[in-house]
Image (cartoon, rainbow, N blue to C red):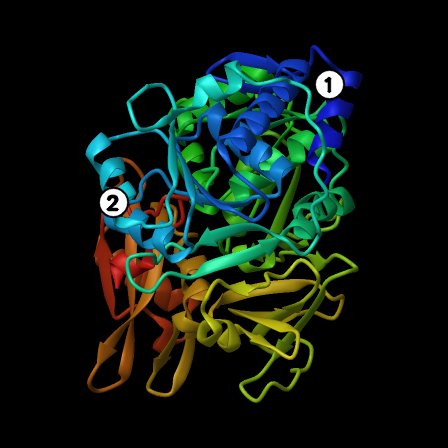
Amino acid sequence: MDIPFLLRRNSQKFPDKPAIIFKDKPVSSGQFKDIIFRLANGLSALGIKPQDRVGIYLPNWPEYVYSYLALFCLGATVVPLDYMLTEDEMVTCLGHCEAKYLIAKAKDMSVLEKLKKEIPTLKEIILIQEKKEGFANFDDLIKNSSPEFKDIYIPPDYLSMILYTSGTTGRPKGIMLVYKQLDACPAVIRYFVDLYTEDIIICALPFSHIAGLMAIQLGIYFINTLVFLERFTPLDFLRNVERHKVTYFYLVPSMYYAILYLKEFEKFDLSSIRWVDVFGAPSNPEVLRRFHKYCPQAYFLNGWGLTETNGPCVVMPMGLEKLESVGKPAPWIDVKIIDEHDKEVPVGEIGEIIVRSWMVMKGYYKDDEETNKVMRNGWFYSGDLGRFDEQGFLYIVGRKKEMIKVSGEIVYAVEVESVISKHPLVKEVAVVGVPDDLRGEIVKAVVSPKAEADLKEEDIRYFSKEHLAHFKVPHIVEIRKELPKNRVGKIDKSQLK
């Protein structure tokens, strides 16, 4: 992805069209290009060179978008950090990748002072929205630099990003992506979805996540306007969809739940929506069907992918709404289902999903041991379980680590969740395995009821017995008002366990 070329193209073709909209404030394509080129020149003057590791620690603000694209113009290696990370997690990530620079919004200046002391490679911290002696200032870099940018040749195998997985408090895993792979998400979406320059995208996911970056990539690649939120709230999301006539969005399943059960949901005009995608976690088809009732004009697509695969690599083809399936891989992506002995399983049988493609990560930064566990003979072992049907459609069954073995019988958490979610009083459900001396493991269901619903544990057990084999029926049922979520909005099963 040639970022400078795309920025120039967009500003020449549609100079006044909003490139981004944040809190109802648009930035035109012409302004957008100038800001990014000024920032790139300012960062270059500060000393940032190709392949320097540069952290970004910001909320979902325009500055996050500008920073990404300016650093890509320079051939730097971007290290996006979630704004919810703790001080210790920041030290761990930035120290591990040997970051030289950090673009940050200070929550506490003492934390940034500590980073300068504890990370010996860190040369400079660039602050936004405030000035302090000993720190560079983001706005000054833009104000004092030229909007004319001289392109730099960036080899396709240069590292574009190191994305840290959520488990950063222990030994961090930094997913390495290269510059060639910046084309990955746009290539997949171009193959499966007919996005036009008139389309308007909304992003409610953090820019520190691959899905947040994907929204930025699609915006500049397809010349779409990108509307984005600082954080996801169902009401604010729907208000922005209606106000800006959004045509395309993708969310994780729990966000759909939150929107559907909002009391004001039916009052919003969703007629502008053309495409709705669900990525990032196994989804319940019933949720999408319910959502579909309120905007029947839109295509509803499932998709599958991981950060290690650089986002979605399997998507439902256009015109087919087989909501139980996540679709088919793009032609340049090989997907197989294998057993525990690395043998491909017959059609219909469940096994681990493995992927081979130029889209797949280079590996985990400075971690050959973890890389070798998941990368073998050119294939990435996803840890997800799935099956193919006779037509070549892929179905996600769950995570390999989430298989529950009850007295030798295998229970897939997603299957039990799918059944329980059909109970009329259930809003959300998560199923986990719990150690048991007699059976090895037993099934536990943690259920969140709909508002004001009088849902009892025995209701879930009785309903499950009607639809599941006896060994799959939850032995333990816990009713909670809400299920714990991580920053991206997925149910956090590690907390439940």
Query: Taking the image as drawn, is residue 280 in sight?
Result: no
Amino acid type, mark 1: Ser
Q: Is residue 326 above or below residue 143?
A: below
Measured Cα–Cα span from mark 1 to mark 2: 42 Å
Where is mark 1, residue-wise?
11
Where's the N terminus, which quadrant?
Answer: top right
Which numbered marker is on residue 53? none
Disc 1 secondary structure class: helix
- What crowding class fits label 2: few (fewer than 14 Cα within 10 Å), some (14-19), or many (20 or more)? few
- Is 411 or 308 nearer to us in this picture? 308
Horizontal side, residue 459 vs residue 409: left or right: left
Earlier along the polypeptide chain: callout 1 or callout 2? 1
Q: Is residue 254 above or below residue 359?
A: above
Q: Is residue 305 above or below residue 348?
A: above
Horizontal side, residue 88 vs residue 306: left or right: left
The residue under the point 56% across, 13% down is 26
Rendered location of residue 167, percent (x, y): 34, 58
Q: Is residue 474 above or below residue 92?
A: below
The residue under the point 67% across, 58% down is 359
- Is 45 or 455 nearer to us in this picture? 45
Where is mark 2, residue-wise?
117
Disc 2 secondary structure class: helix
Rendered location of residue 257, percent (x, y): 42, 40
Rendered location of residue 207, percent (x, y): 48, 37
- What crowding class fits label 1: few (fewer than 14 Cα within 10 Å), some (14-19), or many (20 or more)? many
The residue under the point 40% across, 70% down is 402
